[in-house]
Image (cartoon, helix red, strand yellow):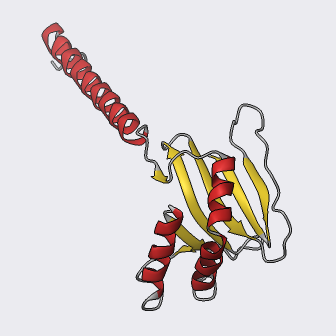
Amino acid sequence: MSRVFPSPRQFVVMLVLLAGTVFGALLCWIVSLLLFAWQWGRDTSRGLGLVTPEQAIAVFHAHRADCARLRELVVPVLPGGNHATAANLPAGRFERCTELLERLGAYAVASCRVESAGYDCAIELASCGNFFHRTCAEFVFAPNGVVPADRPPVGDDPDYDRFTALGDGWFLHYYTM
C-alpha cells in the first residue's frame, strides 16, 4: 500500500530543507543589496567635483577660448552623442582635447548634435554625487543661440536642469539627476 503523504520524519526534513533554501536565498539577496548600495552609493566625483553655478561661470570666463577650441576640435568630426576618445578622433585631436580639458579642470567633451537638446557640444566640467543622485555642471553651445529649456523639480522628483547664458551661444547647464 502506497502512502500519499510523507511520514512525519520526512515532512520535518522537507520543512528544514525548504527553510534552508528560503534562508539562503534571502541571505544572498540581502548581501547583493548591500553590495549594490555600497558600490553605487559611493561618491564618484569627476572633474572639479562639486561646484556652484557661480564657480562654473568663473571657470568659463577664464577659459572661453579653450571652450571654443574644444568645440572646434570635436563637433566637426564626431557624430552626435559621442564623447571624444583616442579611438574616434583623428590623430593629434584627442591629445589636444586632453590638454584643453586639463586646463579647464573638466573631464570630458562630447558632440551632442541632437535637435531636441538644442546644443551641439557639451564640455563636462564637474560631477559630484553617487549613482542615486548627482549634481553636474557642463558648458554647452547652442548654435542658434536659443536658450535650452529649464526643467524645474516636479512632485517628489528633486531633479532639475538650469541653463544660464554665458554669451556667444554658450550656456552653463547645471543639473541634478
Left or right for 97, reference 8: right
Identified at 70% across, 57% down, the residue is 173
> Taking 154 as reference, is 118 above or below it?
below
> Taking 106 as reference, is 142 above or below it?
below
For the N terminus, which image quadrant? top left
Which quarter of the picture shows residue 145? bottom right
Identified at 65% across, 73% down, the residue is 112
Which is more toward the observer, 73 or 21?
Answer: 73
Task: Indicate the position of residue 135 as horizontal and vertical percent values.
Answer: 59, 45
Identified at 35% across, 31% down, the residue is 34
Which is more toward the observer, 50 or 136?
Answer: 50
Identified at 70% across, 36% down, the residue is 157
Task: Indicate the position of residue 118 as horizontal and vertical percent values.
Answer: 78, 69
> Taking 156 as reference, is 142 above or below it?
below
Q: Is residue 84 visible?
A: yes
Task: Indicate the position of residue 7 as horizontal and vertical percent values.
Answer: 16, 11
Task: Indicate the position of residue 167 as horizontal and vertical percent values.
Answer: 80, 67
Left or right for 50, reference 161: left
